[in-house]
Amino acid sequence: MNKKRIYFDMDGVLVDFKSGVERVSSETQEEYKGRIDEVPGIFSLMKPIPGAIEAAQLLAKHYDVYILTTSPWNNPTAASDKIEWVKRYLNGIFHKRVIITHHKELCQGDYLIDDSSKNGASEFSGEWIQLGSDKFPDWDTILKYLLM
């Protein structure tokens, strides 16, 4: 039996972006104001969103899972920092299952869990599950929906 495929965005879904920003000096925050995602190394400083690791582990038992994320074009360390983050927190689940793209709509799958419509998420051919929306405000509602 073929499992349905789920793609997980990273920032704002698995990764707490704000936790990385808080660990950057105020001088650096000021220097990169309006483009904080371009700070070299910032993605390596981020912590998981509460409940996200456990949710990914649970969904991986029932679905074919991948990470589908975007790397800021002007941040030379972002892609490798994201891979290292996955190795640190989710290597057992997403080992060699990370896709970095600015065009998420090109990937084929059943579900995309993403907090933003950017980078093709809203044009994804499967179902876009928007974490933080009224229908899916948190991981608990997503788990109930996908494991019902």
Image (cartoon, grey):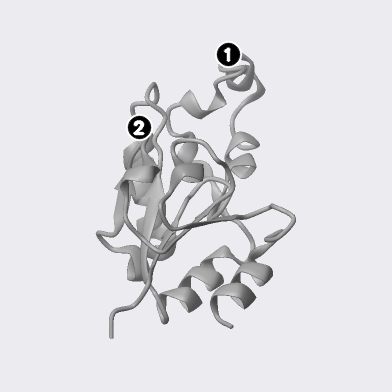
Residue sitting at 32 percent across and 56 percent down? 108
Please indicate whether residue 89 sits to the left or right of residue 35 in the image.
Answer: left
Q: Position of residue 85 (x, y in %)?
A: 41, 51
Q: Tell me which label, 1 or 2, sits earlier in the chain.
A: 1
Q: Position of residue 52 (x, y in %)?
A: 57, 64
Front one among 8 and 129: 129
Identity of the amino acid at label 2?
A: Thr
Residue sitting at 33 percent across and 26 percent down? 76
Q: What element carries label 2?
A: loop
Front one among 43 and 109: 109
Cα separation between marks 1 and 2: 17 Å
Q: Is residue 47 above or below residue 72?
A: below
Please indicate whether residue 99 sits to the left or right of residue 82 in the image.
Answer: left
- Residue 77 is tagged as 2
Identity of the amino acid at label 1?
A: Glu
| Image quarter (top left, top right, bottom left or bottom right) of the C terminus | bottom right
Residue sitting at 47 percent across and 51 percent down? 9
Residue sitting at 61 percent across and 68 percent down? 142
Front one among 57 and 80: 57
Q: In this view, does 93 lie above or below 106?
A: below
Residue 44 visible in image: no
- Determine crowd level at label 2: few under 14, some 14-19, many 20+ residues with C-alpha closer than 10 A: some
Residue 148 visible in image: yes
Q: In which quarter of the image is residue 78?
A: top left
Q: Position of residue 87 (x, y in %)?
A: 35, 58
Which residue lies under the disc numbered 1? 31
